[in-house]
Amino acid sequence: MRQYLDLCQRIIDEGVWINNERTGKRCLTVVNADLEYRVDRNEFPLVTTRKSFYKAAIAEFLGYIRGYDSAADFRNIGCKTWDANANLNDAWLDNPHRKGEDDMGRVYGVQGRRWAKPDGGHIDQLRKIVDNLSKGIDDRGEIMSFYNPGEFHMGCLRPCMHTHNFSLLGDTLYLTSYQRSCDVPLGLNFNQVQVYFFLAIMAQITGHKPGVAYHKIVNAHIYEDQLELMRDVQLKRKPYPSPKLIINPDIKSLEDLETWVTVDDFQVEGYQYHDPIAYPFSV
């Protein structure tokens, strides 16, 4: 929690105003932020200085794991974050590759599970990682990337958190996740939950102990219409201790995650929080 607040304060103190063409808004911006999440200690990085909701973040990542390409599928598992990008993004609505209502195109989990090969067929990046790690193999390339420049035109949004790199040292699993852009007041709370969750669940299904999850953000920013709430409300609140994430121990395989697992298989214990803050969201 302290590193989250330190980053917010750093953006306010050191940030540079940048005009964002996509949203038409100014952002106070810094480059390069490194965060660490102690999965080994079960210190779940859920923000405590405002009420935060973890289940939608986990649901979204379950959708990535399953390779979903429809906002309707995400809604069905408890996540509405793709509704706007799939249905309210003017550039995507006019894109000939869009298949219709709720279609997201070839983004995120589609790339992770069905990366198109130039000679035909697809590569399942996640399946390869799970198979290797389950055998105790780390070939220094246990990488799942959603970032496919050759198919940006076929999706509604370029990936923000784009690459996840697993490392196995003995029987301890580590994760390094890379993010090109982050809306810190809104998005980071979601993203840090997902980085933590991805290491925790991958360690469980591959039979390893979780270590530390490392989260590198390139462009970290606060939008102009979020600044006052961050500076004058959230940063003045005292954080509470980190809660714990409780995962259903019956989840034992990638196939479990693809089929019967729901957000109800994940619970938070000991979560204390301040009142919610309604930060503006930029599409």
Image (cartoon, helix red, strand yellow):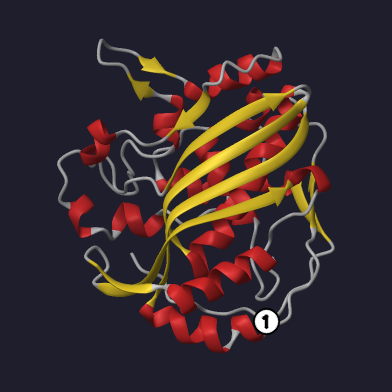
Position above or below: 76 against 151? below
What percent of the width, then of the height, locates residue 86? Answer: 33, 52
Disc 1 marks which amino acid? Answer: Asp
Residue of label 1: 275
Tell me if residue 266 comes above or below residue 211 in the rendering. below
Q: Nearer the viewer, residue 85 or 12?
A: 12
The residue lying at 41 percent from left, 48 percent from top is: 71
Q: Secondary structure at mark 1?
A: loop
Q: Quadrant of the N terminus?
A: bottom right
Residue 103 image position (x, y, % from top left) = 32, 44
Residue at figure coordinates x 64%, y 64% from the top left: 3
Residue at 48% x, 23% y is: 125
Image x and y of residue 61, in percent: 55, 43
Report if residue 80 is visible in the image: no
Q: Is residue 164 left or right of residue 214?
A: left
Q: Is residue 95 left or right of residue 187?
A: left
How far across and down, in percent of the image, does residue 188 sit? Answer: 53, 60
227 or 34, nearer to the observer: 34
Q: Residue at x 20, y 38 (%)?
A: 97
